[in-house]
Image: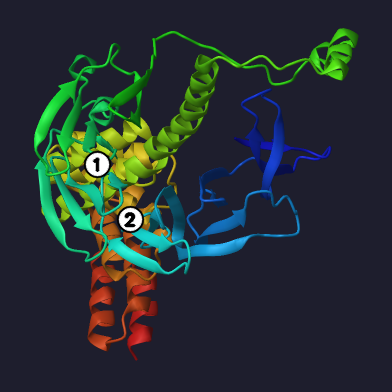
Amino acid sequence: MLGWETDGSNIHNNYIYQISTENFKRKKAVYIGSSNGLTSTVFLIHRGYVYYTTNSNTMKKTSAILYRKQLGNTDKTDTGKIAFEHMGIGAQIQDISAYANNIYISFASYENEKGDGYKTSFSSINIHTLQEKCILDSSIFAAYADSNYVYYENDENTVNCVDTNTNEETFFCNIKGPCYISADTDYVYFDNLQSIYIDKIDEKDRKIFVYDKSGKYVTEITPKNPKDDCYFGGDDMMIFKENIDGENIKCPDIVPEDQKGMTEEELEWSVKNPPRPKVPRYVFIALALILLVAFGGGSWWYYRKNVLPEKYYLRATTLMKDKQYARAEELYRRIMKIRPERRDVLYNIAYCKEETGETAEAIKYYEEHLKTAKNDTKAMTRLGWLYMKGGDYEQALKWLKEAASRDKKNDELWRLTAEAAMKAGDVEEAGKAWSHIATLCKEPDKIMACGKELLALKDYRRALDVYALAE
């Protein structure tokens, strides 16, 4: 279990704890570093080692590192061995799994600090040599690895599998996705709970589809409640954690002093050391379920809030390039529901509206975008252009002048500002714009053309200054 301790400061000393199944006491198993509580940790225990990574939300160039430490190592000076490292803008390790001699890692980064060009990859790491092998180097929806294959969603409705020995990729099956993927020795499971969370299907249509390892449909299972969590335990058994809306159970943050330690009767009993009663089997099952829910819930929250919106953003960007604006807008709206603070989503919705001829809606979304992105000259320019097209020259001038003041070397933007000022009847602003354009021109004939525009405005003083530049 992941936990932390403090030494009186705001720094958390993070540990993996081992919990006894006999008396439920805990002890420190591995020290995995310190933090200020603002980071998220993903870890996995496999064959005597803990593999862990700590992610932070940053859009700067950074390294996402997977560390490895042996169970029992609580030395704070030992930073752990680097098992894998990915460097990039906003680099993150999203998921870790293991099978036999391999650790499987899903990781991602961006093309630039604006959040464009989101890319995910899936690799295996040999636990003996720590050699990396790239399995998938593209945007994937969900993936799961077993001893010989990686099953992944090539798109919402198509599942492919990759041979981990040869890297040969083949079609596996068609599904009604997107779905979460899991597997055991004999079957692969596709849970459409993901489709419910993104509002693609209704809760009443919750299903878990079962396929054999040849890609043949076997059956489908309907959970008792639409949002029940499902854990695949193997041996032809599924374990469900029942989720009922409105249920709110909170553990106390601090254990009261009167509940700590042992009573005199307990101390006396412990000294006598009587035969320890056998712990019922259901206690172990309940503890396992609690741990699964804790880790599964955290992983799902991280996936929904960070990974899923970026996958939608990447697909929407591709649709924009293909001029499929209506479909792109639908994906941007899904992102707004999951992660409304995602940069440029409002701008892209506005652009989709503009390209589909919904000018009034486009203006509304551009202005909403500029409430938070106050220095976005690109949005200001598009907004000014739309007001120009609609004949509202005063509003057009307002936004174009604002954009031009931030982008002083953009010749075309200044010319558009001058045009808006002339149509709005603002001779002073038009004169300022043409005078500035002249300073951007290098050819004498273009400078003279600016002087002629100023003469037409009867701004003789600025016209003389401009003609002096052409000499």
Q: Position of residue 275 (x, y in %)?
A: 73, 16
Q: Residues within 10 Å of mark 2 (few under 14, many from 20)?
A: many
The type of residue carrying mark 2 is Thr
The type of residue carrying mark 1 is Ala
Q: Position of residue 83 (x, y in %)?
A: 51, 63
Which disc, if any, is residue 77? none
Q: Which residue is disc 2 drawn over?
A: 120
Q: Give the residue drawn at x 52%, y 45%.
A: 43
Front-most of 440 and 57?
57
Q: Give the residue drawn at x 66%, y 14%.
A: 277
The reply, left or right, for residue 335 in relation to residue 331 is right
The image shows residue 270, relative to residue 310, as above or below, that is above
Q: Quadrant of residue 89?
A: bottom left
Q: Position of residue 302 (x, y in %)?
A: 44, 38
Q: Give the residue drawn at x 30%, y 12%.
A: 225
Q: Residues within 10 Å of mark 1 (few under 14, many from 20)?
A: many
Q: Quadrant of residue 176?
A: top left
Front-most of 306 and 51?
51
Q: Which residue is disc 1 drawn over?
A: 350
Q: Give the residue drawn at x 46%, y 9%.
A: 247
Q: Secondary structure at mark 2?
A: strand
In the picture, the quarter occupied by the N terminus is: top right
Q: CA distance from mark 2 to mark 1?
A: 27 Å
Query: In the rendered image, is residue 399 in sight?
Result: yes
The image shows residue 251, relative to residue 67, as above or below, that is above
Front-most of 109 and 442?
109
In the picture, the quarter occupied by the C terminus is: bottom left
Query: In the rendered image, is residue 362 in sight?
Result: no
Foreground label between 2 and 1: 2
Q: Secondary structure at mark 1?
A: helix
Q: Position of residue 51 (x, y in %)?
A: 53, 52
The mark nearer the N terminus, 2 or 1, is 2
